[in-house]
Amino acid sequence: MKHSYSFPILLTSLLFVTIALSALNTQVPLWLVREEFSLGQIGLVGSSYFTGNLVGTIMANWFISRFNARFTYTYSCIIFAIATIGLSFSMDFYSWAIWRFFIGIACAVTWVVIESCILVTGTVRTRGKMLAVYLTTYYLGTVLGQALLQYFPQEVLYFGLVIAVLMGLAILFILLTHYKLPKKKKSSFNIMPMIMYKPSRVGLIGCAIAGMLIGSLYSLMPAYYSHLGYSDNQVANWMVLLILSGVIAQMPANWCADRFGRRIVLLVESVFMMIACGLLIFNVYGVLAIILLGATIYTIYPISMAWACSCVRKQEIVSMNQAMLLTNTLGSLVAPAVIAFIMDTLSNTYLFISFAIISLYFVVLLLLKK
């Protein structure tokens, strides 16, 4: 019964964290473009954030075992707020990479806490629906962050103070929940058995591909539209359309995955993603392409998560969750830097050419899957 009312409280806390993260993820590339950073440097700052995600994912289990779930989440929110305010100390590449690294650690730990609470308390029948509601809330918060971005102060210090207020609200709500996660006796680094577990391999690859695509979108899409001459508000509007498409697609996509099978749904989504990338490459039907791109990219992760978790026992779910976040983070870490370098060397349209190649690989993998 405690968990029944803790779930909406947990999602409310997540909403505040996601609004803050969404606004910050779009604003950071815009600040860097304004300061005349190269696309390569912008991509590396984005990769430093995802490097922090990687470290936070690996260490999260240790933090949870030492401080418990709620206090681990609280300390992560405090680190997020301090690091965001720290961005105002200097506008140089190395300091911004360091602060974004700490923000990445904080975000990854909060995600491990939230997803583990959901996966541990859910059942095989309810877990997919709970993940869909969780990710719908996450993407709704992302949309709100983009929509509210025009009302945030543009100066870095005052922007950071608004983020600190949102983190304070997130902490207030998480302390009202009653979640307790099982403590593992083994080292928090012992997640290799989950990564090597063959039945869940395609699910983990799907998590990695989702990380590559979403990480590149957050790091490079604002810069892409900014280089095309769009204003900050117009960039935010395109991001809202992209993410809102993912929000609306969450429940239908997960229902179809339960009804027709996860492999079939992921295969269809990958094909639609290639179509969307083709439209964007040739600059036709831009609105339709962005809707298709958002509806497919943002639904790959929850379906892949449900696939991977369906293959393990309940006591292994926290470790599997770490493995999924680890592979997702590795994709988010590598892709923005590589794609940014390609865009800097060749042209901006290679953002979508890269997405099409990644989608094609996933299609081939799913077709070969028995």
Image (cartoon, rainbow, N blue to C red):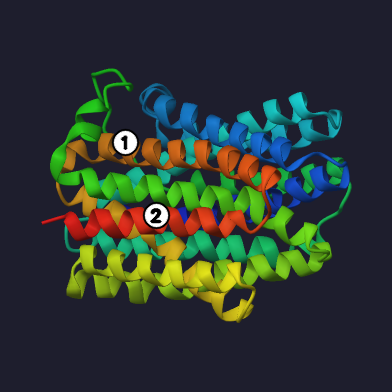
Q: Is residue 251 visible?
A: yes
Tell me which residue sits at (47%, 35%) in the image.
109
- Residue type, label 2: Ser
Q: Quadrant of residue 66?
A: top left
Task: Look at the image and tell me in which quarter the N terminus lies.
Answer: bottom left
Which residue is farthest front? 346
Q: Position of residue 38 (x, y in %)?
A: 78, 40
Q: Is residue 133 left or right of residue 200?
A: right
Q: Which mark is residue 6?
A: 2
> Does residue 135 sit above or below 108 in this rendering?
below
Q: Give residue 89's position: percent from left, percent from top.
A: 85, 29
The amino acid on which the numbered mark 1 sits, given as a three-letter code, is Ala
Sequence-first tag of 2 and 1: 2
Q: How many marks?
A: 2
Asked whether the viewer can see residue 247, the reply is no
Residue 60 in the figure: left or right of residue 195: right
- Between 185 and 230, the residue placed more toward the observer is 230
Label number found at residue 242: none
- Give the residue displayed 30% in from the left and 60% down from the top: 363
Q: State the residue at coordinates (59%, 60%).
A: 142
Label placed on residue 323: 1
Mark closer to the observer (2, 1): 1
State whether residue 84 is above or below residue 265.
Answer: above
Crowd band around label 2 with a 10 angstrom C-alpha radius: few (<14), some (14–19), many (20+): some
- Give yes or no for contact between labels 2 and 1 (Cβ–Cβ under 8 Å): no
